[in-house]
Image: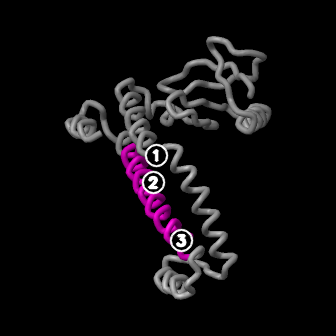
């Protein structure tokens, strides 16, 4: 972990000035991988920004991009959208993804490469083997695949809401209708 000195800019973006030795009121803490990337960008003469709402790092933003979330109201709505997404997708989602990858590789090792085009055929093939372990794995695989589909749907909705929020004028009637749906 490394600390970086920041200054406020428009909206939720903070400009990263450089690395500092310890935590201060005007610093942020970044993990090792992100720290190395930020250091490289700074050495390359790039202007690096930290988003205080979602923790993302951006490089060389133009004036228009800095103003996208300049209003407090939009910042609050963006935070609400993010919290809603995160509340639906918890740590179990990560465990499901790990299981899904592992199950996919186990099925692959057993000779079953399941795609959207051939899935029904492969499901039948696995069931017809009579191999209880393989059938049980397939059942768990299908259950987790359903959960992953839900996560993908939620992520799509999240992206659509953030995009719409960026496009709306916060003084419009459409904006007021939009925030009521969140």
Residue 2 lies left or right of residue 16; in this view the side is right
Q: Position of residue 100 (x, y in %)?
A: 57, 62
Q: Residue at x 25, y 41 (%)?
A: 181
* Residue 81 position within the rendered picture, expressed as x and y whole percent measured from the top left: 38, 38
Q: Quadrant of the N terminus?
A: top right
On the question of residue 136 being in view, the answer is yes
Q: Are marks 3 and 2 in contact (CB under 8 Å)?
A: no
SS for callout 1: loop
Asked if residue 45 can be seen in this view, the reply is no
Q: Which residues are magenta?
A: 135-163
- Residue linked to disc 2: 151
Q: Nearer the viewer, residue 94 or 21?
A: 94
Q: Secondary structure at mark 2?
A: helix
- Whether tag 2 and tag 1 are in contact, CB under 8 A, the answer is yes
Q: In the image, residue 36 lies at what x, y percent? A: 77, 36
Rendered residue at 49%/70% (across/down): 139
14, above or below 139, in the image: above
Residue at 57% x, 86% y is: 129
Name the quadrant containing residue 78: top left
Residue under circle 3?
136
Residue identifier under label 1: 89
| Crowd tier of the residue under label 3, counting other residues whose Cα lies within 10 Å: few below 14, some 14–19, many 20 or above | few
């Amino acid at each position: 972990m490394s600390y970086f000195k920041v200054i406020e800019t428009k909206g939720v973006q903070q400009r990263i000035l450089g690395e500092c030795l310890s935590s201060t009121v005007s610093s942020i803490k970044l993990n090792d991988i992100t720290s190395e990337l930020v250091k490289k960008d700074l050495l390359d003469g790039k202007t690096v920004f930290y988003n205080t709402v979602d923790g993302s790092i951006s490089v060389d933003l133009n004036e228009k991009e800095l103003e996208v979330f300049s209003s407090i109201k939009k910042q609050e709505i963006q935070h609400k959208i993010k919290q809603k997404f995160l509340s639906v997708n918890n740590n179990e989602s990560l465990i499901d993804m790990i299981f899904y990858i592992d199950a996919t590789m186990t099925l692959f090792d057993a000779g079953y490469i399941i795609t959207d085009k051939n899935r029904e055929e492969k499901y039948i093939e696995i069931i017809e083997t009579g191999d209880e372990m393989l059938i049980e794995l397939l059942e768990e695989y299908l259950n987790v695949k359903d959960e992953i589909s839900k996560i993908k749907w939620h992520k799509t909705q999240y992206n659509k809401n953030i995009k719409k929020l960026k496009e709306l004028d916060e003084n419009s009637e459409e904006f007021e209708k939009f925030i009521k749906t969140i």
